[in-house]
Amino acid sequence: MNSAQVPPPHPGSFVSRVAVSVVIATPFSALCWADAMGVGGAAPAWWLMPVVMFIAVGGAGEAARMAHDHGLAIGWPIVAAATALVPLIAVAAGHAPGTSPVAVLGWVACGLIAILGGLFVIEIVGYRQDTGCLHRITARFLTIAAIGLPLAFMVGLRVLGGSGPVGLVPLVSMVAVVKGGDIAAYLVGSQIGRHRMASIVSPGKTWEGAAAAVVASLAVAWFILERSGWAMAEPWGGWPVYGLAVGLAGMLGDLSESLVKRELAVKDSGRALGGLGGFLDLVDAPLFAAPVAWLLWTLGGPGSAWPPA
């Protein structure tokens, strides 16, 4: 463990992050309101699909660009279209009559298998020996699954909640727990962090920041699930399990993206979001946390008691 002083962030970086976050949060909040109220008679999750598509296409574009910069052309149109298709399958299956939460993910799994088959067909049709077709298939499918599948879980969280403002709780609670931990880790780690957690992969992350993230994630989970009055049911294990499991999953997602960026020698996945970096920098933690949150909500409240009577 390296206990060397962790360099503080640039003074303007935090202000830039806050400014971009406010700009992003405003339309997202408006779409959440429209989705919760079912504006235009739309079923749950449909009003949020523009956000999902934005992340899917933008994230796939960043992955394709980073791959291209390292000599592997995976084709952005193919990867972007397939990545966007995965959460679309989830929202369509989620509103099919009599479809259970687990069955929704079964349809998503079938879709991923079909996409994998399609990737093989593309290479079979245009096959040329020694052109790296297996590398392309692997990189394409990994990108599609790593971005599209967690987005499908996020859609699943929204569909679990059902109609009305209360129906947003499963999705919003996941985002709040992860981002609460992320903010606490940044603030505490940059101010009093002394012991690096992964000095090579992500020099800025510290054990002090990680501890603050866990505490903040637990506090956010406690507030939303116990004190806010919004949650009419709760995930398996209640707020302690939810806050700890979702918070740790988010931290793993953050570190995993740091590993990818370190291996590809880039600081951010992109610059589309200004101070926040790229699309993948914004959603790296939720991509890992969403499946954990979905599982806990499915085992707990929404699977049987949601939406509330």
Image (cartoon, rainbow, N blue to C red):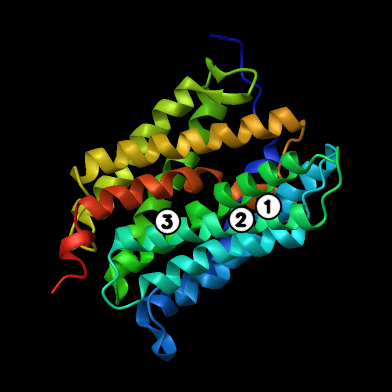
How far across and how far down the image is residue 46, in percent? 46, 76
Residue under pointer 1? 120
Q: Say the numbered circle drawn on residue 153.
A: 3
Task: Sort mark 1 into few (<14), some (14-19) or many (20+) by Cα contacts within 10 Å.
Answer: some
Query: Which one is earlier in the sequence, the residue at label 3 or at label 2?
Result: 2
Q: Quadrant of the C terminus?
A: bottom left
Residue situated in front as seen by the camera: 155 or 167: 155
Q: Quadrant of residue 69?
A: top right
Say above or below: 48 vs 61. Answer: below
Give the number of the disc on residue 161: none
How much space separates mark 3 and mark 2, taking CA atoms? 22 Å
Residue 166 is at least partly visible in this image: yes
Q: Is residue 142 left or right of residue 296?
A: right
Q: Is residue 232 above or below residue 123?
A: below
Q: Count of labels shown?
A: 3
> Which amino acid lies under the numbered mark 3 shown in the image of this protein?
Phe
Residue extending farthest to the left is 309
Camera-side mark, 3 or 1: 1
Q: Are marks 1 and 2 in contact (CB under 8 Å)?
A: yes
Name the residue located 59 percent from the left edge and 66 percent from the top edge: 53
> Tag 1 or tag 3, which sits nearer the N-term?
1
